[in-house]
């Protein structure tokens, strides 16, 4: 029997078992297929035949980096290359994800499209074709980081933690530059925008809110009344108002608490508001994990002679965070999508870039093409975070042991 026949028989058996096991199942399957046909076919016809994608191609610079100077785009591309290498090493040592996994393929695709199309756009503005080689360098560095670290048996969690911290600092220096420097001229952050700004606000919000959320969760369970009441008041106040309210308050209130000579940019104020908002929700998720642990964990730690700090950071918190990984990743995904609100306070993020693109006289009426594109971008990054969360849950045995 040929392999083709075997595959065909397996497919028939799968269809009988999963879609046509009974008349009710068959009716539901046929109805679902018909509904999918009614929805997907018009979308496919629009995407392939009716849509005008020129608005995306002509504004790819705007969608990618906002108003970032075209002659300085190499700094953004270099950031992407370094990021690919760091991701490759981190994936190889800290996860069980294979190099051919669907999530990594989508990551390659997203980065490739951004760099290649962005390079073409910059060529029209006077940059040379060197930016195309950043794509090859990024993929090569990813493969190098993955293959070299995968062969090592020892864990380097601390090394990669330091690497991510150094990368964040280096990326901010590369993007910002220095006043009066001819090699890295100053690029003020009001020129940053598009996907670059969306990812920057997301990363800063997640990285800063996580330790702040842990502190709030522990403070809410503290036996000291002042600390406990402060944490409860902060959490309930922040969770009781929408993010857009905090963004507007950040624009007005933060400068009032600073000296007149200290001017804080709009982007920094948005990051502070987003961090405070995410920290309140992180604190409640972590507190739920703390309450799920049996009291015997504390008693066992005390019996071993551990003090309260050692008990919390070596015994309690690792188990509590492990138990609420799905909720924490869900909050990270929600925060990534909530960054679209920063367009309301004047920042040109991905959503703000979309509004600016459809406001151009040549592209009026192309809202569907623009918002379908940015919806796809949001979905790709959200899916990547979801896939990583599922992998992390399997690796840590969440829900199994």
Image: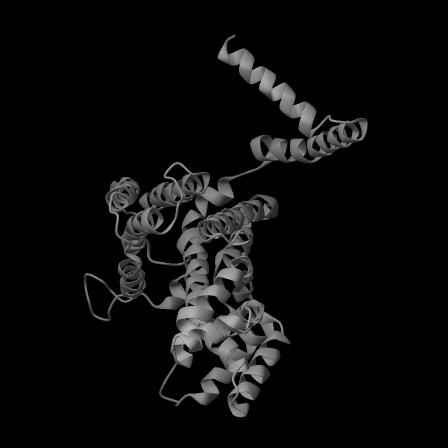
Res 268 visible:
no
Q: Quadrant of residue 291?
A: bottom right
Q: How is the model colour-coded?
A: one colour
Tag count in the figure? 0
The image position of residue 90, as x and y in percent, is 33, 51
Residue shown at 56%/48% (left/top)?
375
| Residue farthest toward the left in the current orientation of the protein | 182
Q: In the figure, is residue 72 to the left or right of 335?
A: left
Q: Which sits in the foreground, 217 or 362?
A: 217
| Residue farthest toward the front in the current orientation of the protein | 303
| Residue farthest toward the top in the current orientation of the protein | 1
The image position of residue 360, as x and y in percent, is 53, 52
Up-down relation of residue 291 to residue 142 (above or below): below
The image position of residue 63, as x and y in percent, is 45, 52
Res 368 visible:
yes
Q: Which sits in the foreground, 60 or 321?
A: 321
Q: Which sits in the foreground, 301 or 97?
A: 301
The image position of residue 397, as x and y in percent, is 49, 52
Residue shown at 43%/76% (left/top)?
303
Q: In the figure, is residue 233 to the left or right of 103?
A: right
């Amino acid at each position: 029997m040929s392999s083709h026949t075997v595959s065909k028989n397996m497919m028939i058996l799968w269809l009988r078992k999963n879609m046509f096991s009974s008349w009710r199942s068959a009716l539901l399957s046929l109805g679902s297929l018909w509904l999918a046909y009614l929805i997907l076919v018009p979308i496919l016809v629009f995407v392939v035949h009716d849509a005008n994608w020129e608005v995306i191609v002509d504004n790819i610079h705007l969608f990618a980096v906002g108003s970032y100077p075209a002659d300085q785009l190499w700094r953004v591309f270099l950031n992407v290359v370094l990021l690919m290498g760091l991701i490759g090493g981190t994936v190889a040592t800290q996860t069980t994800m294979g190099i051919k996994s669907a999530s990594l393929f989508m990551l390659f695709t997203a980065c490739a499209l951004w760099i290649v199309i962005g390079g073409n756009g910059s060529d029209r503005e006077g940059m040379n074709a060197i930016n195309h080689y950043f794509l090859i360098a990024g993929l090569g560095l990813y493969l190098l980081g993955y293959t070299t670290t995968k062969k090592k048996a020892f864990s380097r969690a601390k090394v990669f933690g330091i690497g991510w911290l150094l990368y964040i600092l280096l990326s901010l220096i590369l993007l910002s530059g220095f006043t009066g420097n001819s090699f890295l001229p100053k690029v003020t952050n009001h020129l940053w925008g598009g996907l670059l700004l969306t990812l920057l606000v997301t990363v800063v919000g997640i990285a800063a809110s996580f330790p702040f959320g842990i502190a709030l969760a522990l403070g809410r369970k503290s036996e000291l009344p002042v600390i406990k009441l402060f944490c409860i008041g902060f959490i309930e106040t922040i969770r009781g108002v929408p993010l857009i309210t905090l963004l507007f308050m950040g624009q007005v209130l933060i400068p009032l608490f600073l000296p007149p000579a200290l001017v804080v940019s709009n982007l920094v104020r948005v990051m502070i508001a987003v961090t405070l908002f995410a920290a309140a929700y992180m604190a409640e998720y972590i507190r739920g994990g703390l309450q799920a642990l049996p009291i015997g964990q504390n008693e066992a730690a005390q019996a071993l002679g551990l003090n309260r700090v050692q008990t919390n950071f070596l015994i309690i918190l690792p188990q509590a965070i492990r138990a609420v990984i799905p909720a924490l990743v869900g909050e990270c995904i929600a925060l990534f999508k909530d960054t679209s609100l920063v367009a309301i306070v004047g920042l040109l993020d991905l959503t703000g870039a979309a509004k600016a693109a459809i406001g151009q006289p040549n592209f009026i009426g192309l809202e569907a093409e623009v918002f379908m594109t940015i919806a796809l971008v949001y979905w790709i990054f959200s899916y990547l975070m979801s896939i990583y969360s599922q992998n992390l849950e399997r690796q840590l045995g969440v829900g199994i042991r």
